[in-house]
Image (cartoon, coloured by chain):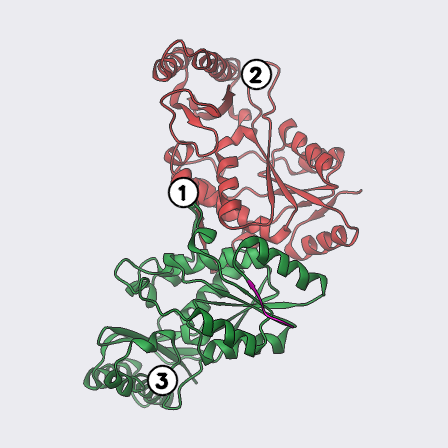
Chain colours: A red, B green
Amino acid sequence: MQLTVAKDMESLQEALAGLAKAGKRIALVPTMGALHAGHVSLVKLAKEIVDEAVVTIFVNPKQFGPTEDYGRYPKSPEEDIKKLREAGAALVYVPSADDIYPPGFSTSISVGELGKILEGKSRPGHFDGVATVLTKLFLSILPHMAIFGEKDYQQLCVVQRLAVDLDLPIEIIGAPTMREVDGLAMSSRNVYLSVEERKIAPKLHEVLESVGKVIASRKVSVKSALDQGIAALGKGGFKVDYLELRQAETLAELRDFTPPARLLAAAWLGATRLIDNIVVE
Amino acid sequence: MQLTVAKDMESLQEALAGLAKAGKRIALVPTMGALHAGHVSLVKLAKEIVDEAVVTIFVNPKQFGPTEDYGRYPKSPEEDIKKLREAGAALVYVPSADDIYPPGFSTSISVGELGKILEGKSRPGHFDGVATVLTKLFLSILPHMAIFGEKDYQQLCVVQRLAVDLDLPIEIIGAPTMREVDGLAMSSRNVYLSVEERKIAPKLHEVLESVGKVIASRKVSVKSALDQGIAALGKGGFKVDYLELRQAETLAELRDFTPPARLLAAAWLGATRLIDNIVVE
C-alpha cells in the first residue's frame, strides 16, 4: 500500500475512510518526527499485529515546558516520509499546531498523580500535554490499537491509565526500547550530544543494567543499590535527575524488590537530558 | 423496540452491538435520573432526529462539591424506567459508581476558563466532573449524537467545547428548557422546594424574561437592567448567586447587548439552589 501523507483533518478523514472501506484494521504510532530505527520498529510491529500502520508526526507544544527544547526539537520531514514509506506505513498525518489547537481550544486532560511523579516532577504539565494531544489523535483516528515505545515508559503507563479511565475503545501496546550497539537507547534527542558526550551516554544504560542485577540479587537494599548507581552516574559525568525502582504499572515507589518492577532513570549530560529504563526481574 | 436496561458495561456493549447490527443510529441522553417531562422531551427528540434513544442514569459523585446534595439527590429508579419505556427509549444504562470509577481511576478533564465561571465559580470542580463522566459515557457508547437540555445552558456550552476540543466524533445538540405552566424550569431539584417556596420559584423565570426585554430594548445599560433584576429577585425572597448577560457560545461577559446573547441566573430559595436562563434577542 502506498503511503498517503495527510496534512489536514479533511485529507486524514478521507484516507481513514479509504482504509475502513477496505476493511483494514489499523494501529496508530504517534511520533514527534525526527524518526529513528525505534520508530521504524513500531511501524513494523503495527503491520505485524494489524493490517496497516497509521503514523502521526506532531511536535506537541503543550508537552514542553517554557525552558525546554520545543523550539530546537530536531526536525527531518523529508527523511521521515522516506523512512515511513520504506517501513510500509499506509498513512501519515502531519497536522500544524493550529490544526490541533485552533483558537479557543481550552481543554486539558490530567491522569493525576501518575503524571506528577518522575518525569512529571521534572517536567510539570508534560503529561497533561501528552494525555490531551493523544486523546485528540486517538479520537480523530479511532485506531484499533496504538503502539508506544517502552523508552518513554512512564508515558506508556500514562496512556494505559488514560485509555482505561476514559473507556477509550483502543488497545494500548508497549514495544521494547531499540538501542544503539553500545546500549544507548535510541532517541531523537541523541543528536544534541557532542562527540564526547555521545561516548559517555551509554553509561546510563550500563548503570541501569548493573543496578538492576544488584536489586534482583537481593543482596543489598534497594536504596543502597540505587545510591551506588547514582554515585556511578555522577562519577561518569552525569547530573542525575532520578534513578528509582517503581512498581511496573502504577509506578508506585518500591522500597523492596517486588516484581513486576521497573528501574527508571533521567540524567543530564551537559545540556542534554537523557532518560532510560529497564525491567527488573 | 423494547427497552433494554443495562446495569453493567458488558450488557451495555451487548445491547449497543445489537443496535449497531440493526443499523440503528443512536442519540445519547445522559441524565442523573429523577426523570421529569424535560428528560422525556429529550428522549422524544432523540427518536425524531435519529433512530433510537440511549439514556444513561448516573448520579455522578465527581460533579458534586463536598457541601452539595449528592447524598440526598432525588432518586426514582422504577418511575424512571417506566417513563423511558413509555417515551420509547431503546436502552438505558444504569452503572454503579464503581463501574464508572473503579479503584485506581485518576483521570480528569477540564475545559478551562469556561468551566470556572458562573456555575463553575459557585461550584468549583463541577464541570471537571461533568466533562470527565461525559467523556467516559461518550466513549463507552459512541453515539452519533448527544442531547442536552438548555436548562443547564453552561453545561451545554462546556460539552460543545469538549467535543470540539477533543475531536469527539459525536454531534452535540441542545434542546429547549421544559417549563411548568407557571414558567418554572423543570428540574429534578424542584422537589426540594417547600409549598411556599414552590409558589415563589417561578419568579426567577419572570425576572429573567423582564430583564431580557429591558436589555433587548436597549433603553437602559445592561448593568442597570441586571441590577434591577437582582433587586427584584431579592425582594421576591431569593438570595441571588448571579444574574449575568453572556455571549451565547463562549459565555464571555457582555457589557453591551450584542447578540447572540444569553441571560443566566442562579439563586437560592431557602436551602434550594435554582438555575435558569433565556436567550436575549
Residue at the far top in the pictured view: A219
Q: Residue B39, percent across and down? A: 48, 75
Residue located beneath label 1 in the image: A125
Q: Is residue B84 above or below residue A260?
A: below
Q: Position of residue A208 (x, y in %)?
A: 47, 17
Graded by Cα atoms within 10 Å as few (under 14), some (14 to 19) or many (20 or more), the crowding at tag 3 reads: many
The prevailing secondary structure element of the residues shown in magenta is loop
Residue B86 visible somewhere in the drawing: yes
In percent of width and height, residue B50 lies at: 64, 73
Q: CA distance from mark 3 to mark 2?
A: 71 Å
Query: The residue under label 3 is which amino acid type?
Result: Leu
Q: Residues within 10 Å of mark 1 (few under 14, many from 20)?
A: some
For label 1, the SS is: loop
Q: Is residue A270 visible?
A: no
Does B62 sit above or below residue A26?
Answer: below
Foreground mark, 3 or 2, reads: 3
The three-letter amino acid code for the residue at tag 1 is Gly
Q: Which residue is mark 3?
A: B184
State the image coordinates of residue A256 (x, y, percent, origin top left). Answer: 38, 20
Q: In this orientation, which residue lies closer to the viewer: A221 or A146?
A: A221
Residue at far front of view: B78
Residue at the spot of label 2 = A183
For the point 60% across and 63% down, the residue is B143
Residue type (three-letter) at the residue carrying disc 2: Gly
Q: Quadrant of residue B188?
A: bottom left
- Magenta includes A8? no
Residue A256 to residue B134: above or below: above
Q: Residue at x 27, y 57 (%)?
A: B66
Q: Nearer the viewer, residue B11 or B192?
A: B11
Task: Specify start and end residues of the magenta stretch as a single range.
Answer: B1-5
CA–CA distance in space, label 1 to label 2: 30 Å
